[in-house]
Amino acid sequence: MTDRSDDEVELLTTARALCDRAQPGERIEVLLSRGTGTTVKVFGGEIESLTSAGASGAGIRVIRDGRQGFAHCGSLDRDVLDDTLAEARDNHTFAEPDEFNGLAEPDGVAAIDLDLWSEAVLGTATDRKVEFALELERRVTGIDPRVTSARSTAYGDGWSVFALASTEGIEVTSRGASCSMSTQPLARDGDETQTGWSYDAGRDPEALDIERTAAEAVERATRLLGATKPASSKRTILLEPRLASMLLGIVSGMLCGDAVVKGRSPFADRVGEQVAASGLTLVDDPTRTESLAADRFDGEGLACRRNPLIADGVLQGFLHDSYTARRSGTTSTGSAVRGTRSLPGVGAQLLVMEPGTRSFDELVASIDHGLFVTSFAGLHSGVNPTSGDFSVGADGILISGGELAGPAREMTVASTLQRLLLDIREVGGDFEWLAGGDGVCSLVIDDVSVAGS
């Protein structure tokens, strides 16, 4: 197991001391964090801004007689922490009692041995960080003459350390560091303009792929130039891994315990039923060390673990933190997510799809009358998380006779999430780890209403 750093030991010692002040009948949980972030933004070959700032914080829960109080602060000063504990105690007196309120208890699941730290991030000089951003902008504006500028071109990195302790015997720490770059090129053809984007992230600045990021951003900015509004019809849609991740991220929200216990999930009471095509297998697995989103502990200090959600189209279960687990008469799945400013909630941490066999080009060739969707608009506002109704704006490239045809825009894609899952014809073999952490593939979905002109 990785030895604790001095920062981790210091934070854990402070958290323990606060927990030791619990009064009779009182349960206390303390989450402390410290970190620093740097962001370089450039435009027109010049530095637009350079910021570097540190942040610290604490979130303290106090539970007694079923009443829960919470308070947070932006300092690790002992006097401030004392005041925050007192505030949490005071807040608990105004809370309504809830028999399911409580802290997570150790469950015996061992955490993966994972080192998220990066000396490469900490050791990169500021001048080098500026060079990354400037080089990305130069690449972006040098690929295609239709790209006239690149907005929001930036390099960023940061590190953080956290410690969590509770009167229930949980004492955990973790630390991590990462870096990223991003850009939004503007392409112009006559009076028409289109914006693209791309980004990359990792734990080593020198491993960031500037060439791929630039090329991808330019391709996304130029591929919809000259787009028209197609006639309305039923089409087979093709979602690249990034958009498949967005879609399945919404589905995973419907498989969270809070949505289920509140009667707001269309998948409640459907465990063991076929809810998707047999080709879809989806798990929430933050133990996948290949991913940037891998982690050792959830927001309540329980070990992260692999949680099957859908296997060959069959619903396997739901994600729970300790609260929703108590309400549901089950156990936590180690799926609490939070920051120091918030109470724990339930959420997927690292979605992973099981890949199929065919490449993206082979998927395109298999579609006679379709649409390669390149972007969704209003994805979250256009989806009803209770009913599953799905109606969002979309841009993309038409597919005709197994080939990419002309670009199309100003369309509306409509269905229900339940129907989209069942109508998945194929999961692609083009598995990739997204910079956000998820491991996903392209999806081919049949018989979707695409409204245009």
Image (spheres, rainbow, N blue to C red):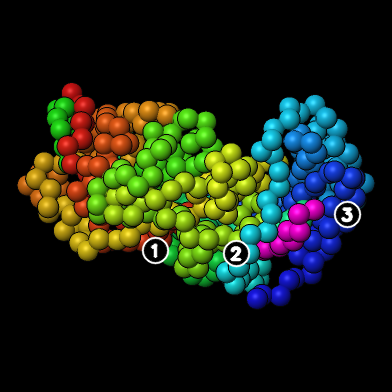
Q: Residue at x 78, y 40 (%)?
A: 63
Amino acid under disc 3: Asp
Identify the image quadrant of residue 371. Answer: top left
User: Are the residues tagged 2 and 1 within 8 Å (C-beta)?
Assistant: no
User: Closer to the camera, 321 or 174?
Assistant: 321
Residue 158 included in the magenta stretch of the image: no
Badge 2 element: loop
User: Are the residues tagged 3 and 1 within 8 Å (C-beta)?
Assistant: no
Q: Which residues are magenta?
A: 167-178
First of labels 2, 1 by sequence position: 2
User: Which image quarter is the N terminus in?
Assistant: bottom right
| Pointer 3 residue | 20
User: Closer to the camera, 349 or 232?
Assistant: 349
Report the disc number at residue 211: 1
Residue 362 in percent (x, y) is at 16, 58
Observer able to see residue 360: yes
Residue 117 in percent (x, y) is at 63, 68
